[in-house]
Every structure is written in C-alpha cells, then in structure tokens.
Image (spheres, rainbow, N blue to C red):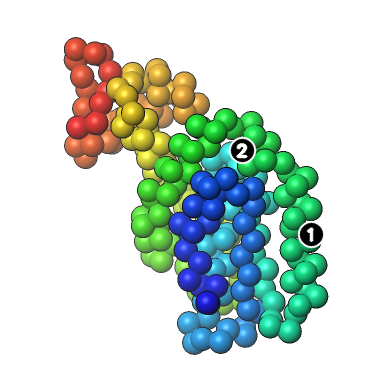
Amino acid sequence: MCSGRVDLEFILKAFLNGEDGVLVGGCQLGECNYTTQGNFDALSTVRICKKIMGHIGLNPERLRIQFMSSSDGALLAETTDDFTREIKALGPLGKAEGLDAEALKLKLEAVRKLVPYIKLVERERLRVPVKSAEEYDKFFASDDTNRLIDELINEKLSISEMMLLLNESPLSTGEISKILDLEPSEVAKHISDSSKQGLIKYDESGKCYVLA
C-alpha cells in the first residue's frame, strides 16, 4: 500500500487505542512507485499531525516517518529498534505527558472529529509547491505556516473539545475554562462563534451552556 494512503485518522485511532507510538514507513522520496508521489502526502500528514500533537500536549516524537526502499532491510530493522527504544524511554502515552486518560481521549476525539476539515485546510492552504524534503522542512518550520495552523486548526480544536464536553453535560463558561485550561476570554469567543452558528445555546434556568 502506498504510504500516501495513511490517513490522519489512522494515526489518531492508533493513539486512541492506546498505542504509545506510531511509525509510518514509505518508499524513498523521489522514488515513488506511483505518479502521485504519495510519500510526500504521507510526509505532509505526519508533519501536520506532529504539530497538532504538540498543541494538545502529546510529545510529537511519538510519531515518526521513515523512507526506505524494498532493499533496505537493515535500515528497517535499525529504525524499528531505535523507535522502540525511544518510545519506551518516553513512557506510556499521556501519562508521561501529565494527561489523564479522560483528558487524553477528549483531545484525541476532538482532533478526530476535525479530520475532514484538517484535510481540506491541508489541500487548500498547506500544500508545499515543490516536492523535496528540504522544501517540506522549510515550509513546516516557517512562522507563516505555524501561524496558519494556529489560526485555521488549533482554534477549531478548542471548539471541538468544547462541543464534546457539552455533549456530556451542560457547563458554565468558568467550568469549560477550567476543564480545557483556557482563558475565560477565549472560551467566551468560542461560545460566541458557536452560538452564531446555532451549535450551542444558553440555558437560562441552569445558567449554563448546552448543545442547541
């Protein structure tokens, strides 16, 4: 299977299932067996996912991509051994980062629900014009790209987390702020945006917010 078919949701499901690390393998860049050069798509997916992981509090080093040819058996063994050692050193998923199981599940589910949107953003705003490892490194390390990801993805993640919380029970602005570790002003903005879209409403009787 082409590494370009490794969907972001596959990676998230692995972490949701409790895997401590995910290793994606693909053919060497510039040596794709298909005209699509899907290994560059896999590289983009991994780079975006690592940035999202950092945002939600997971160590991005839990995700790695390695390019190799079918004759690189030694490299495969070396990479697998090295990654296994690194993951063991990092410790259990979430626990090592100070996230309890429920908080981790909420964050990963919030990302998973945004996968179609994230893929749209990647296609329209985060495509690297030149297919080379150097250009991908430069693009994803740039301040402009980090700003785009903050504006287009990370804010949506906070709203997604908030919607998941409200799906479980009505909450006040202060309660949402405390659970998500956000400033009340940020929560108020997310509530305002979501209310305008008809997603949530204020319950006068309970003095809290609920799903619309």
User: Height in image: 96 above or below 126?
Assistant: above
* Helix, strand or loop at mark 2: loop
The answer, for residue 160, to whether it is visible in the render is yes
Residue at image point 47% right, 21% down: 178
Residue at image point 41% right, 29% down: 186
x and y percentages locating residue 161 in the rendered image: 40, 36
- Residue farthest front in this picture: 17
The answer, for residue 53, to whether it is visible in the render is no
x and y percentages locating residue 148 in the rendered image: 47, 52
User: Height in image: 131 above or below 172?
Assistant: below
Q: Residue 94: which disc?
A: 2
Q: Nearer the viewer, residue 127 or 22?
A: 22
Looking at the rendered structure, the kind of residue marked 1 is Asp
Q: Residue 27: which disc?
A: none
Q: Residue 82: which disc?
A: 1
Residue at image point 54% right, 65% down: 44
Looking at the rendered structure, the kind of residue marked 2 is Gly
Residue at image point 54% right, 33% down: 101
Spatial CA span between label 1 and label 2: 21 Å
Q: Earlier in the sequence, mark 1 or mark 2?
A: 1
Quarter of the C terminus within the rendering: top left
Check disc 1: other Cα within 10 Å, few if <14, some if 14-19, many if 20+. Answer: few
User: Height in image: 187 above or below 7?
Assistant: above
Q: Is residue 92 left or right of residue 125?
A: right
* Helix, strand or loop at mark 1: helix
